[in-house]
């Protein structure tokens, strides 16, 4: 059974890389099978088709980022401490972050047919942690939609800055 999971993991890793670099239309199932060093039939066995593979790559990536960010959180952290930890995580995982955004921004795929997302919570990664920390900071008198806005803004700024700081042009300067 471990061999099946190893094969599936290899396919997912290669698919993330290729979909991120070449896009959905520029990546074939044959390309993925060849680079993963697996039989083409095993890709079809595990995922049925390219679109299902794409959705699973996306879902797995979201779930993994959520798990990793939850591991970073410590009860004694405040909003600033956790935001810095998130930023550092995204800087260290910049390749995965960039590929995730490329997956999201792909206009060739209709995500409405993807079915339900398997993540524990919907919304930004670690959104529940950030909402708790924002609430601790500003109190529950601030309306929930205002606190959600702060969480969305924080996530946007953290990911945006991590992507910019990962740019080879910025690194050179």
Image: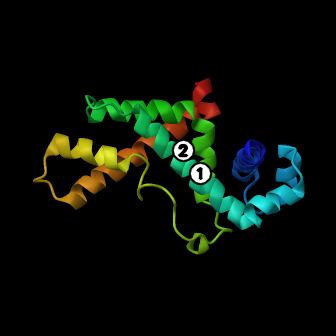
Residue 158: which quarter of the image? top left
* Residue 35 sits above or below residue 117 on the image: above
Find residue 91 and name its label: none
Element carrying mark 2:
helix
* Residue 68 sits above or below residue 148 on the image: above
Residue 94 shows in this picture = yes
Find residue 60 and name its label: 1
Residue farthest along the front direction in this orientation: 1
Between 43 and 80, the one lying in front of the other is 43
Q: Position of residue 47 (x, y in %)?
A: 73, 62
Q: Position of residue 142 (x, y in %)?
A: 14, 54
Find residue 64 and name its label: 2
- Position of 170 compared to 20: left or right? left
Q: Position of residue 11 (x, y in %)?
A: 76, 49
Q: Residue at x 83, y 59 (%)?
A: 29
Residue 28 shows in this picture = no
Which class describes the residues within 10 Å of circle 1: few (<14), some (14-19), or many (20+)? some
Name the quarter where the C terminus is drawn: top right
Answer whether labels 1 and 2 touch (C-beta < 8 Å).
Answer: yes
Element carrying mark 1:
helix
């Amino acid at each position: 059974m471990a061999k099946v999971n190893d094969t599936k993991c290899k396919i997912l890793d290669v698919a993330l890389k290729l979909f991120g670099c070449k896009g959905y239309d520029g990546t074939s199932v044959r390309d993925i099978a060849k680079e993963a060093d697996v039989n083409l039939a095993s890709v079809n066995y595990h995922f049925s088709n390219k679109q299902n593979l794409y959705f699973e790559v996306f879902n797995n990536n979201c779930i993994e980022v959520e798990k990793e960010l939850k591991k970073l959180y410590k009860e004694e952290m405040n909003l600033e401490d956790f935001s810095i930890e998130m930023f550092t995580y995204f800087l260290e995982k910049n390749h995965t972050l960039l590929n995730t955004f490329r997956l999201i921004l792909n206009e060739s795929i209709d995500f409405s047919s993807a079915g339900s997302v398997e993540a524990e919570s919907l919304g930004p990664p670690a959104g529940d942690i950030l909402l708790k920390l924002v609430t601790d900071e500003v109190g529950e008198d601030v309306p929930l939609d205002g606190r959600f806005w702060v969480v969305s803004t924080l996530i946007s700024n953290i990911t945006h800055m991590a992507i910019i700081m990962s740019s080879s042009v910025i690194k050179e300067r």
